[in-house]
Image: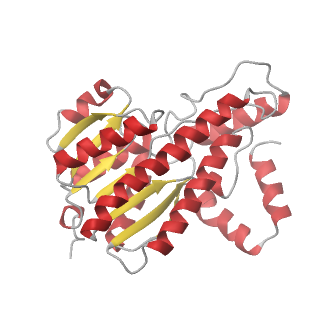
C-alpha cells in the first residue's frame, strides 16, 4: 500500500528560505506531494523558477526585519486561507573568532535567526491553535548538540531554537498541532559559500576548522535526503526530534553523547574539525 500523500494532511505550507539548499528541497518535496507552497526569499526574483510551477507562490520576506516579516507572513496566510504547515528554515552562518569579531555580528545573527524566527513561530501557531490543526517545523541543527567551532552565534541560535521547540512540544501536547525539531547535519548545499566571514586575520586553528567544514559540507548528502526525512516525520503526525544527515552525525554521534562523557564528546568534536 502506498503511503498517504502529504496533501491529505497538509493543504498549504509556508517555507522560509526556499530559494536554495534545504529550503528549496523542502518546497520541491511538498509540491511533489500536492501541497500548495508559499516560499520565501529576500528577493522574490530568486524564486522565479519555482514560481513557474503550479501550486507555488513566491513571497518576499526579510527575516532581518521581524515585524515586517510577520506582516508578510500574515498577508500570505490570509491569501492561503491559513497554513497547515510552516517550516522555519531561513538563516545564515557567520564564521570568526568570538573575541576578535565585533559583537554586532553575533548580535545580528541571534536577532535574525532566533528572535525573529520565534516571532514567525508565534504568528504561525496562532492560526494553527485556532483551527486545532497544523505542524510547525523549526529547522535547528545538529550544532545544537555538537557546536561548530568559530560559529558561536550560529550555535546559540540553533540551541535556542531547539529549546523553543522542546517547550512548544510540552505546551501543545494532546492538541491537533505538532511541533518538529529538525536537526540536520552537513548537507551538500552552498551554506559555506554564503557564510559571512568578518574581516581580520585568521589563525591556523581557524583555517583548519574552515577547511574541515568545507570538506564535510561538500561530501554530505544531497538536500533531498533531508526532505525525505522531513516527509517521513510529517506522515507520522506526532511531535518530536528529527536528526538527519550522514550516518555518523545523525546516529553514531548522538549515541556517543547519550552514553559517553562530555569530555569524550569534546574530544571527538575537536578531532572532527582538526583542532
Instruction: Say which quarter of the image contains residue 6.
Output: bottom left
Q: Nearer the viewer, residue 141 or 62?
A: 62
Question: Colour scheme in the image?
Answer: secondary structure
Q: Is residue 133 above or below residue 48?
A: below
Instruction: Say which quarter of the image contains residue 230.
Output: bottom left
Q: Is residue 234 above or below residue 91?
A: below
Q: How many marks?
A: 0
Work out which quarter of the rendered image holds the N terminus and state it: bottom left
Q: Is residue 244 left or right of residue 1?
A: right
The residue at the point 67 percent across, 58 percent down is: 145
Q: Is residue 222 left or right of residue 133?
A: right
Looking at this rendering, what residue extends furthest in the bottom direction?
174
Q: Residue 15, how many percent across, how many down?
A: 34, 46
Q: Residue 269, how many percent across, how many down?
A: 76, 52
Looking at this rendering, what residue extends furthest in the left direction?
54
Residue 35 visible in rendering: yes
Q: Is residue 261 left or right of residue 194?
A: right
Work out which quarter of the rendered image holds the C terminus and state it: top right
Q: Nearer the viewer, residue 47 or 260?
A: 47
Q: Nearer the viewer, residue 153 or 264?
A: 153
Q: Is residue 223 above or below residue 63?
A: below
Residue 242 visible in rendering: no
Q: Is residue 50 left or right of residue 209?
A: left
Q: Residue 198, how many percent across, how many down?
A: 68, 23
The residue at the point 49 percent across, 38 percent down is: 189
The residue at the point 39 percent across, 74 percent down is: 238
Q: Residue 44, how many percent across, how many down?
A: 30, 28
Amino acid at each position: 500500500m502506498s503511503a498517504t500523500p502529504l496533501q491529505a494532511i497538509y493543504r498549504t505550507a509556508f517555507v522560509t528560505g526556499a530559494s536554495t539548499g534545504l529550503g528549496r528541497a523542502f518546497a520541491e518535496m511538498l509540491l511533489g506531494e500536492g501541497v500548495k507552497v508559499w516560499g520565501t526569499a529576500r528577493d522574490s526574483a530568486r524564486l522565479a523558477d519555482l514560481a513557474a510551477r503550479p501550486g507555488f507562490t513566491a513571497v518576499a520576506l526579510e527575516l532581518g526585519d521581524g515585524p515586517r516579516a510577520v506582516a508578510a507572513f500574515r498577508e500570505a496566510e490570509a491569501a492561503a486561507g491559513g497554513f497547515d504547515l510552516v517550516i522555519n528554515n531561513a538563516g545564515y552562518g557567520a564564521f570568526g573568532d568570538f573575541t576578535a569579531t565585533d559583537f554586532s555580528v553575533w548580535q545580528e545573527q541571534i536577532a535574525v535567526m532566533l528572535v525573529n524566527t520565534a516571532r514567525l513561530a508565534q504568528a504561525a501557531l496562532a492560526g494553527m491553535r485556532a483551527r486545532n490543526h497544523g505542524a510547525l517545523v523549526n529547522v535547528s541543527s545538529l550544532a545544537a548538540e555538537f557546536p561548530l567551532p568559530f560559529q558561536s552565534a550560529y550555535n546559540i541560535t540553533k540551541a535556542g531554537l531547539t529549546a523553543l521547540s522542546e517547550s512548544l512540544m510540552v505546551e501543545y501536547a494532546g492538541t491537533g498541532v505538532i511541533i518538529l525539531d529538525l536537526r540536520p547535519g552537513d548537507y551538500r548545499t552552498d551554506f559555506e559559500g554564503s557564510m559571512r566571514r568578518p574581516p581580520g586575520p585568521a589563525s591556523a586553528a581557524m583555517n583548519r576548522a574552515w577547511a574541515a567544514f568545507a570538506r564535510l559540507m561538500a561530501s554530505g548528502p544531497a538536500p533531498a535526503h533531508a526532505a525525505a526525512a522531513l516527509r517521513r516525520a510529517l506522515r507520522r503526525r506526532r511531535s518530536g526530534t528529527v536528526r538527519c544527515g550522514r550516518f555518523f552525525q545523525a546516529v553514531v554521534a548522538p549515541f556517543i553523547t547519550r552514553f559517553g562523557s562530555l569530555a569524550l564528546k569534546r574530544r571527538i568534536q575537536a578531532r572532527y574539525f582538526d583542532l
